[in-house]
Image: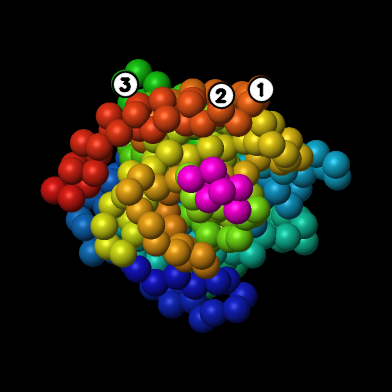
Amino acid sequence: MKVVRYGTDAVPFMKETAITVGTFDGVHVGHVGVLHLMRDVAQRHGERIVVVTFDPHPQIVLAKEGREPLRLLTGIDERCELLAAQGVDLTVVIPFTRDFAATEASDFVRTVIVRDIGVQHFFIGHDHVFGKDRGGNEELLQRLSPDLDFTVEGIPPLSFGGVVVSSTKIRNALKGGDLQGASTMLGRDYSVRGVVVRGDGRGRQLGIPTANIAPSDEYKLLPANGVYAVMAVINSEPRLGMANIGLRPTFTSDTKPTLEVHFLDVDIDLYERTLDVTFIAKIRDERRFESREEFLAQLQLDRMQTTTYQHHIKEWRTS
């Protein structure tokens, strides 16, 4: 799949294009359903599949000053990788700014979509809106399509297990520690990509060395505070670990959550490596311990519970 940044890279024009526009945060099962519909039409008509998306996320750019920014399921790099895995031929990333947000929806369709990218079939969700004052929708596209020579493909709500999936629902599930619900809606286990950075070394002093993960995307959503069974690929091998997300109240009481991972039976210097930490299950909530001994005793229990997920490693090797 080719990825181009609109306004910086040359965009390959092609009239024979099935296109859709959206943030696609998470590339969840609902998004995948849309992409499958696009693939069916594109194959019948000899078209390429194009996704137009935005970076930063529009809600981050347009957020009111002082408000907590939206936390994302996927940064732009991960999003593009997931789109590529679904057979998308071209992803056009539009740098989203307040100036761009002032673009009239009809101008966006005429210039960006029709003139610069090309479109034969325009796919749009039944409730999707775009452009200045959210003026772009399926009705607008239907009005524009005869003069601009494209066909509008309206997408009805796609439900899975009786639930209409959305990125917001997945974020809420993760914030509530519901990994299973999030995984079901994503179609995969949730993961956080990040670089291993230097910590305070307390874990090693306690005999439980940890990798301190700084998420690669500053807006990446971390699941609810707590202890989790996780997995990451290290030196081409899947490794099981237990992760802590939270403020570490027993020792420091940080001001914002951090992600630390202790990999079981791994004694490798991971400093400055990039890891994809996949969350398998939540073990317990984070809590404050009254003593070092109480803390270490609980970690042994956490470790024992984490080892019960060893079958995930075997499944990964055979997948």
Q: Secondary structure at mark 1?
A: loop
Query: Residue 27, how many percent across, how many down?
Result: 42, 46
Asked if marks 2 and 1 touch (Cβ < 8 Å), the reply is yes
Residue 62 placement, left or right of 299? right
| Residue sitting farthest toward the right | 65
* Crowd class of label 1 (few under 14; some 14 to 19; many from 20; radius 10 Å): few
Residue 161's tag is 3
Q: Amino acid at mark 3?
A: Gly
Name the residue at 21% across, 57% down: 43
Q: Amino acid at mark 2?
A: Glu
Q: Per the image, is 205 magenta? A: yes
Q: Per the image, is 240 magenta? A: no
* Crowd class of label 3 (few under 14; some 14 to 19; many from 20; radius 10 Å): few
Q: Amino acid at mark 1?
A: Glu
| Residue sitting farthest toward the front | 293
Residue hosting label 1: 290
Viewer can see residue 2 = yes
Viewer can see residue 142 = no
Q: Earlier in the sequence, mark 3 or mark 1?
A: 3
Q: Secondary structure at mark 2?
A: helix
- The quarter of the picture where the N terminus appears is bottom left
| Residue sitting farthest toward the bottom | 10
Q: Earlier in the sequence, mark 3 or mark 2?
A: 3
* Crowd class of label 2 (few under 14; some 14 to 19; many from 20; radius 10 Å): few
Magenta region, residue range: 201-207
Residue 294's tag is 2
Query: Residue 219, how many percent across, how many down?
Result: 63, 49
Establish if 209 lies above or below 270.
above
Name the residue at 43% across, 75% down: 13
Query: Residue 172, how many percent across, how many down?
Result: 56, 28
Name the residue at 51% across, 81% down: 10
